[in-house]
Amino acid sequence: MKLSLYCPTCSRPIADLNNTAPQVTCTACQHRYGIVHGKLSKHSSVNETLLFLSHKLPSLHKRHYTLQITTPDRNLKQLQFSIPGKADPLPVHYGDVVSVLYTMQGYLMKKLVAVNNHTTGKRYVLPKPVPSSSHLTLTLSTIVLGLLVGSFFSGVNVFLVSVATALGVLAYLKVTNIAQLTNPSLEYGREGTRLAGDQRLLAQKLKIEHRLDEINHECKSNQGLIDRLDDLKQKMVDVDQQLYAPRIFRTTGAVTILKQQITNNQRLVREYRRALQMIEIEMETSWIADQLPDASNFTRAIMQKLEELKAIEDQNQFLKLQLTAYEEVKHHVIPGYDG
């Protein structure tokens, strides 16, 4: 399923969430945005009454949201923000695939601008971008510092200015809307345990992919060495088989070890690729349904399979130690061979 993202400024498509980075730049208006994309695992919407005198008089309300998003890489992102008003205009529900779009200050969120619901196709562009808590703190600090410095040089009572400024800041923070994006720690419980298991599987996936590259390189290297040893052994046989008998014997032994290593590596490649497929199935399954009752069983099965493959890895290490004993192979049979 293609999940397109549109620029809040010019409404043109800026990204396909299936193939995008955490940051994206709109090619039309050149606005740069940060993106958080995933499944909504927690959602709360709370109304706060800031001012209420009577039903006949205007009242002042503020709505606070908490969105906890489980990203495709099985991490948690928590977005907390507030908007003015009593109504609940955000079109998201538990289990929806959503994305959050925000402007950036360096690599941090500067202002929240939009929330997209890719399950329903709806999106909510904030009427006015909501500043992050860090951006708001920096702005207020600059203003307060300017007031204090100005009062000091103008001769105004600094203490009274400080008190008035502090009260003003508290009142401003009360009515101002802010946004905060955090990485909450995994909680204990079924969902947290599953996410922790998924993260272990993803870490194993990266290790397996790296190990597969090493094994493939090792297989090519060993096969090349076997070909060179076979050619050299044939030359020794053609010249004087009796004279070169000790070297021929050692070369034959080295070739046998190298072939066993290749056999082991080929089995490792098959099993590691199978483990990768199992991990990919688990990741896709987790994305579709986070609350499967047998999820932990499959995670344990994959980890057990990887543990079993260590025996083959250990055997290969033992074969490498055996091969190092063949000094003739390293230093005499093939000059310049580094092992």
Image (spheres, rainbow, N blue to C red):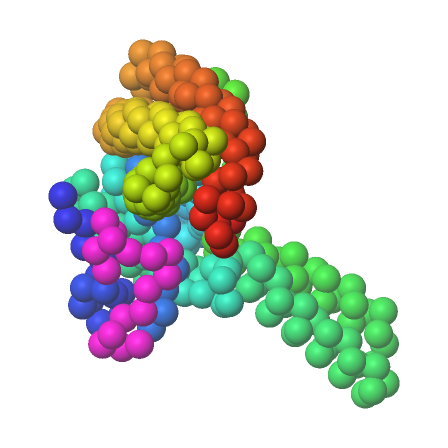
Nearest to the observer: residue 182 or residue 88: 182
Judge whether residue 244 is colored magenta: no
> Residue drawn 52% across and 34% down?
326
Q: Quadrant of residue 237?
A: top left
- Point out the stretch of residues depicted in magenta: 15-30
Against 226, residue 34 (above or below) is below
Q: Position of residue 279 (x, y in %)?
A: 31, 28
Nearest to the observer: residue 233 or residue 195: 233
From this viewpoint, is residue 298 visible? yes
Which quadrant holds the N terminus?
top left
Against 330, residue 303 (above or below) is above
> Residue drawn 43% across and 37% down?
244
Q: Quadrant of residue 84?
A: bottom left
Against 101, residue 155 (above or below) is below
> Residue drawn 37% across and 61% down?
23
Q: Position of residue 243 (x, y in %)?
A: 44, 36
From this viewpoint, is residue 209 visible? no
Against 250, residue 149 (above or below) is below
